Amino acid sequence: MKECLLYTNFSNKSYTFADVNCNSREILDKPLIVNCANCTNTEVWCVNKNKTGRLDYYFLYLISNNFLVETPNGKEMMYEGDIVVIPPNEPYTFTPEKGKQIYYLCVHITGYDVEKLLNEYEIAIFPEINKLSPNNHLQQRFKKLFDAFAKNDEYRDRELANLVERIFIEAARAIKARDNDKNILSKSIRYINEFYTTKINIPSLAKMENMSMTKYNKIFKEQMKISPTKYIISQRIHLAKELLETTNLSITEISLTCGYDDINFFSRVFKENVGMSPTSYKQKINAD
């Protein structure tokens, strides 16, 4: 039997690919509602076909395999790391390559703000495929979304909506990073975006681009409007703020997760960039 793990507002369970319209609904009086999400990771070959389309948006992130995507509006191939968004009421067929592991994450969303958010983050709707490389951060965003379904309280819908927007943000970053392939700093920028929580040596980034340190710093600042060091810090601080907002990790744990072994140094850098200490920021979030 072809199965995957389905997360809904009602239960987390396995379901067959025949249930293509399960939990499909259109809601237009709220900005963003998550109907369901799922994680499929199987060696069983199958075709995902929906002759009528769903009532919501279908956002699919392909991790492994290649899919032929077909709708009345066109036919396109999507490859590992790509994202496709199928709009409401559009029939579709996903045909994977045979003999390959099928692994993808997806979420079904509705609401009057969905199209506006997709446009804001420049995430294309099919027949255009969003091209990006496999992204661990995007997978982590989906895991947080799946985990949030277990929270059966009055805040769950709002949290799910916030997590979907974070998925959009991470997807937008990954798409822009892929676009930077045309940029002469593409190798080092992709490296930073993937490994900013580790120790990164600026001379090694310059070497990656076959440049001197002076030239690398100059071109980086011209193109990114910020120095390499400040760019790395901005990525780390963004992650630190997210962890303070969404987890119960201690300041020490967050410091280590973001790449800072010295909690005092982390607190100083955080305050310089945010205007308050991590502890004060956490208290402010809790108070709000």
Image: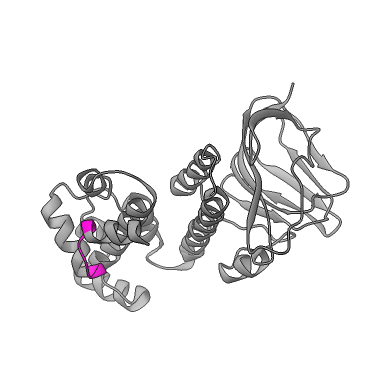
Magenta residue check for 239: no
Residue at 48 percent of width and 47 percent of height: 141
- Give the number of marks: 0
* Apparent side of residue 130 relative to residue 97 in the rendered image (left or right): left
**Which quadrant: the N terminus?**
top right
Q: Which percent across, then down, holds residue 167?
A: 52, 54
Residue at 62 percent of width and 65 percent of height: 118
Q: Which percent across, then down, holds residue 260?
A: 19, 50
Who is closer to the viewer here, 161 or 53? 161
Q: Is residue 188 visible?
A: no
* Apparent side of residue 91 relative to residue 159 in the rendered image (left or right): right
In this picture the colour scheme is: one colour
Q: Is residue 120 visible?
A: yes
Quarter of the image where one finds residue 23? top right
Residue at 26 percent of width and 71 percent of height: 227
Q: Which percent across, then down, holds residue 274?
A: 26, 68
Residue bounds of the magenta highlight: 273-279
Q: Which percent across, then down, holds residue 146?
A: 54, 40
**Which quadrant: the C terminus?**
bottom left
Q: For the view shown, which residue lies furthest in the top direction?
A: 1
Who is closer to the viewer here, 29 or 229? 29
Who is closer to the viewer here, 277 or 134? 277
Quarter of the image where one finds residue 36? top right
Residue at 71 percent of width and 49 percent of height: 77
* Apparent side of residue 66 relative to residue 147 in the rendered image (left or right): right
Quarter of the image where one finds residue 39? top right
Q: Is residue 54 above or below residue 41?
A: below
